[in-house]
Amino acid sequence: MTDDTTEANRGVGYLVAASAVSAVTALSWLGRPLLTLPDLAMLYLLVIILVAVRFGRGPSVVASALSIAGFDFFFVPPLFTFAVANKRHALTFAMMFGVGQLISGFTLRIKRQELSAREREARAAQLAEEARTAALRMRVEEMRSSLLSAVSHDLRTPLAAITGAATTLRDESATVPEAERRDLLAAICEEAERMERLVSNLLDMTRLESGGLRVKREWVPLEEMVGSALARLEPRLGGREVTVRLPETLPLWSVDPVLLEQVLVNLLENAVKYTPAGSPLEVRAGADEGTVFFEVSDRGPGLSEEALGRVFEKFYRGPHVGVGGVGLGLPICKGMVEAQGGAITAENRDGGGAVFRVTMPRGGDAPATGA
Amino acid sequence: MSEAGPLVLVVEDEPQMRRFLRASLASHGYRLLEAGGAAEALRLASAHPPDLVLLDLGLPDADGIDTTRRLREWTRVPILVISARQREDDKVMALDAGADDYLTKPFGVNELLARMRVALRHAGRALDGTAAEPVFESGELRIDLARREVTRGGAVVHLTPIEYKLLVLLAQNAGKVLTHQQILREVWGPGSTRQTHYVRVYMAELRKKVEADPARPRHIVTEQGVGYRFREG
């Protein structure tokens, strides 16, 4: 427990006690026609208390003693002696000393309490900080083990299918009908593609996390990126109706076309995964003063209250436990969009379904081409 | 030309990849030469001139793009480079260094064979000096080069001079990828300093005129980060 009253401090305290008492004595002597003895007693008490508060017990005892001496010598008859004419004054002196010490004691205790309260506060803050760090570390660990188990599951599942199919085809002791053989071979191809998609997502996420994403901006027509995104997803669209509504006058986007195409692919893939087979999808775009935007909408079940807030979180998979995927598609979109200065939002749609909206700053006007 | 199929030089260090290429190419009548690295590849290519080179850009002993350049110093043999996903820069550099087309791992055998066929066809045409056909057809699109007329489903399509040049370039290279730089050079001239967005904008205009649904093009395919390809058939 620390205390203001270090050695040096106390030394100074004694000096101050002496000076203060002297000062009060001198001033009071000058003002003695106006002051009565009780007034003087109060003044000395004040000095004793102030010295106690600032310098502690030692100096306050000295201040008390000097005050009484001064009081007696200069103001109590007979003047200029330490003798006391009226015995009552001895009681006054005793009271001055006593009260002075009492108050000093109180103030010292208050000071100590204040100090220890401050210390407790500092300790509590430190503990809170440690608790927060520990909680954070735990969350990271959780996420890491959740990632590992999700990846492990999502890679093992197609691997199991491939191993199973390949070893069955290899098995010379059984005769597998031609149609079955074809199915098994198709399964091997499809499951390999699934694994490729997962690996791609993991790589994208890693690049985003490590800051290894290079953004190469160009002036690109949105139509082109929508077209190539749809082409990539063709086999998985399963004959769904996809309506593309792009205004004729849509300006060129200043973006990295490879990244933005990936965003479109991820959003469309997400829509395909979480909406009933055959339900329609829509891609809409527009522009206003300083921004351009596009929206990918579906007629699926829409997003729950919880999902609306968490859908862009890594590994968040929502209530659809049966659907494959590690839960990286949307966080990757968010990362890629934000790396280009844009924003992405998710909302529910009038009439059912969800709509994901990507907004980008226009970045000025595209240079003219004379087209 | 002899009865034997075209000679393909496979430059690939992964044994499993070589196994699959060997099996699929041989079963389609191609003859194979295999090299596990760039040095071996250059040696074999000069000793037994191949009809086509399959070059993996991820070789351990050399830079695939450098190897492409070195090959191009003395041969016009078609070169197909194999690269990993998300390495668009590698693909563009390889194409600009003289490669004819690319494949992205993992790829299927159909894609491989199709690209090889296209590359051999274009090389063959260049070799024996066959003039391009006077009429080019793909689906409902018909380009009459002699009359400079383009029709879609019988109806005439009006193109600006640049759009026409662009379409003809794509059609004459049908099935083969063309980089933005290559297109800029061929259509706007070798001294062109214009940015790639020129190509994109004109391509968008062209699609509006020749594609049934410009947002889902059937003929002019975007190879993101690399360039464009006119789809055959």
Image: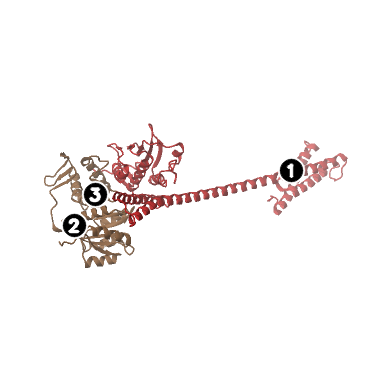
- What is the display colour for chain A? red
Q: Three-letter amino acid code at disc 3?
A: Arg
Q: Is residue A284 above or below residue A174?
A: above
Q: Which residue appears at 27% of the width and 57% of the height?
A: B81
- What is the display colour for chain B? brown
Question: Is residue A332 visible to the viewer in this orientation of the structure?
Answer: yes
How packed is label 2: few (under 14 Cα within 10 Å), some, or many (20 or more)? Answer: some
Q: Three-letter amino acid code at disc 1?
A: Phe
According to the image, label 2 marks what residue? B123
- Numbered badge on residue A68: none
Query: Is A3 or A360 nearer to us in this picture?
Result: A360
Residues at marks 1 and 2 on the same chain: no
Tag count: 3
Instruction: Tell me where residue B70 appears, x and y as whole percent.
Output: 25, 63
Q: Three-letter amino acid code at disc 2?
A: Ala
Q: SS class of the residue under badge 3?
A: strand
According to the image, label 1 marks what residue? A106
